[in-house]
Amino acid sequence: MDTAAAVRWTRLALTLLIVDVTGERIGGVRQLRRSNLQFVQRGAGRKLKLTFRGDTLKGARQRTIPFPLKESRLVSELLVELPVIGNGLLFTNAKGMPMSTDAFIEELHELAKAAQVELTPDSVWHGARVTWATERRHLDPRP
């Protein structure tokens, strides 16, 4: 597999992992920078705290989400495989510029098709967020 293809698959894995843990909107995820990821030593492992900047979110309020240890390790492993771009964005186009929402969704669909994973024709994102929220509906939202 060539480097560009490997980067695309790594981005897909990272995207799906972030969505699974956070349930965040596409605008917030596609604008993440390495500086939004903070690893903190906790006992035997490093746990990730992921901060979504207010200017990238619909509600315009900054949110910090702690990741479980297992998912923190996976993010750390995936980050090693992603090239570091000058602007620090995790999800960029071939020229190192931010991906548009449409391009981001299109890439997710292309990769899912190549992996023979069936997605809804409209938007994988909305369905993933609804599923995420539904599965966690019974949880107490207070820390």
Image (cartoon, rainbow, N blue to C red):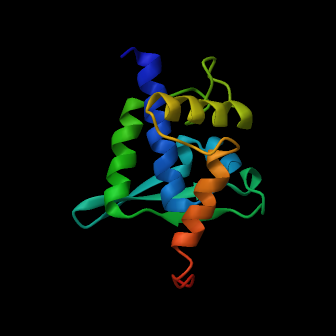
Residue 100 in view (yes/no): no
Say which residue appears at 52% left-offset and 31% top-offset: 113
Taking depth in this image into account, of 47 and 112 the one nearest to the observer is 112
The image quarter in which residue 9 lies: top left
Say which residue appears at 41% left-offset and 24% top-offset: 6
For the image, the number of numbered tags is 0
Say which residue appears at 58% left-offset and 42% top-offset: 33
The image quarter in which residue 134 lies: bottom right
Residue 130 screen position, x and y as percent? 63, 63
- Compared with 125, 121 (above or below) is above
- Judged left or right of residue 72, residue 53 is right
Quadrant including the N terminus:
top left
Taking depth in this image into account, of 23 and 32 the one nearest to the observer is 23
- Compared with 68, 88 (above or below) is above
- Compared with 142, 56 (above or below) is above
Residue 79 in view (yes/no): yes
Residue 109 screen position, x and y as percent? 59, 34
Residue 69 screen position, x and y as percent? 33, 61
Residue 16 screen position, x and y as percent? 49, 47
Say which residue appears at 63% left-offset and 55% top-offset: 127
